[in-house]
């Protein structure tokens, strides 16, 4: 169906689903940014590797879980 032939309820439902998907992606990005700000994730700048401290087992699990959510869609 095209946009013109869809019922308003269907279009609204699709818009809501798209919006929720974008919000979830933003939440995942924000969580990962928080982990980076907390120096929990290593990062690279001009081929140099930086790590401020060792990760705790809980942080490792959280990072893995977030990465898995993002990349297994």
Image: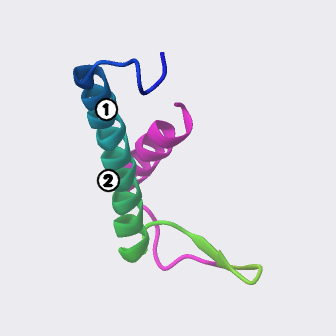
Disc number for residue 27: 2
Rendered position, 37 above or below 4: below
Rendered position, 71 above or below 8: below
Where is residue 16? Give x, y as percent.
26, 35
Q: Is residue 68 magenta?
A: yes
Q: Main secondary structure of the magenta part?
A: helix
Disc number for residue 68: none
Q: Secondary structure at mark 2?
A: helix
Number of dots carrying numbers? 2
Quarter of the image where one finds residue 42: bottom right
Where is residue 30? Give x, y as percent.
35, 62
Frontmost residue, 59 versus 9: 9
Rendered position, 13 above or below 44: above
Rendered position, 10 above or below 38: above
Where is residue 48? Give x, y as percent.
72, 82
Frontmost residue, 52 versus 62: 62
Q: Residue at position x 48%, y 22% from top?
A: 2
Q: Residue at position x 44%, y 51% from top?
A: 63
* Residue that lies at the very extreme toward the left in this rendered image: 9
Separation of marks 2 and 1 at Cα, in angstroms = 15 Å
Q: Which residue is mark 1?
A: 17
Frontmost residue, 64 versus 24: 24
Query: The magenta stretch spans which residues?
Result: 49-73
Q: Is residue 34 magenta?
A: no
Q: How is the image coloured?
A: rainbow
Q: Residue at position x 49%, y 66% from top?
A: 41
């Amino acid at each position: 169906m095209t946009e013109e032939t869809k019922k308003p309820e269907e279009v609204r439902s699709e818009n809501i689903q798209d919006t929720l998907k974008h919000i979830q992606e933003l939440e995942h990005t924000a969580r990962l940014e928080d982990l980076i700000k907390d120096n929990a994730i290593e990062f690279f700048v001009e081929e140099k590797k930086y790590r401020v401290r060792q990760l705790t087992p809980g942080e490792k699990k959280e990072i893995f879980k977030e990465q898995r959510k993002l990349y297994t869609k």
